[in-house]
Every structure is written in C-alpha cells, then in structure tokens.
Amino acid sequence: MTPEDIKTLREHTEMTQVQMAQLFRVPPTDVMAWENGTLEPDSDELALLERLRTSGSTKKRYKFNK
C-alpha cells in the first residue's frame, strides 16, 4: 500500500491522523510518516489497513480486535 493509498483510505473513512493512530494503537507521528513515505506500516498494520479498505464504509465506528 502506497503512502497515497493510506492517506486516501484515511480520508475516505473520514478519520483524522490522530483517530487513525488511536485505531492502530500507534503514535500519530507514525500515521503522518506512513502518509509521507518516511515509514512503512509493519505486516500487522498492513493487514489492518487492508481490512479497513475492504470494509468499504465511511462514517463507521472502527475497532480492531487484535
């Protein structure tokens, strides 16, 4: 997933970077870094990003049970 894909997904789900960080249990700086390409999500985070993408919904309450 490219940095642009991550940003587009976050915007599609109408989340702020802080909200996405809370969902993924990472610091907000990680989400910023994912979006600008200076850090790549790890394999678990990529799997969760895919789950979020395949949900296809906006304005929905998200919670991952790890």
Image: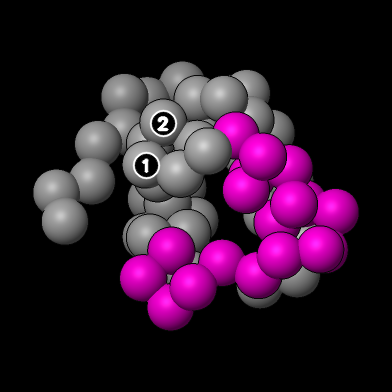
Q: Amino acid at mark 2?
A: Gln
Disc assigned to residue 22: 2
Crowding near pointer 2: few (<14 within 10 Å), some, many (20+)? Answer: some
Task: Tell me where residue 22 sits by quadrant.
Answer: top left
For this view, does 2 lie left or right of residue 9?
Answer: right
Label 1 packing within 10 angstroms: few (<14), some (14-19), many (20+) = few
Residue 64, above or below 23 = below
Q: Determine whether 2 is above or below 53 in the image.
A: below
Residues at marks 1 and 2 touching, judged by CB atoms closer than 8 Å? yes
Asked whether residue 6 appears in the rendered view, the answer is yes
Magenta segment: 28-45
Residue 17: x, y in percent?
Answer: 63, 30
- Callout 1, which amino acid? Arg
Q: Residue at position x 14%, y 49% from top?
A: 65
Q: Position of residue 61 (x, y in %)?
A: 31, 24
Provide the residue designation for mark 1: 25
Q: Is residue 65 magenta?
A: no
> Residue at (85%, 54%) from the top-left corner?
36
Find out whether residue 36 is within the magenta segment.
yes
* Secondary structure under the numbered disc 2 in the rendered image: helix
The residue sitting at the left extreme is 65
From mark 1 to mark 2, how far is it between C-alphas? 5 Å
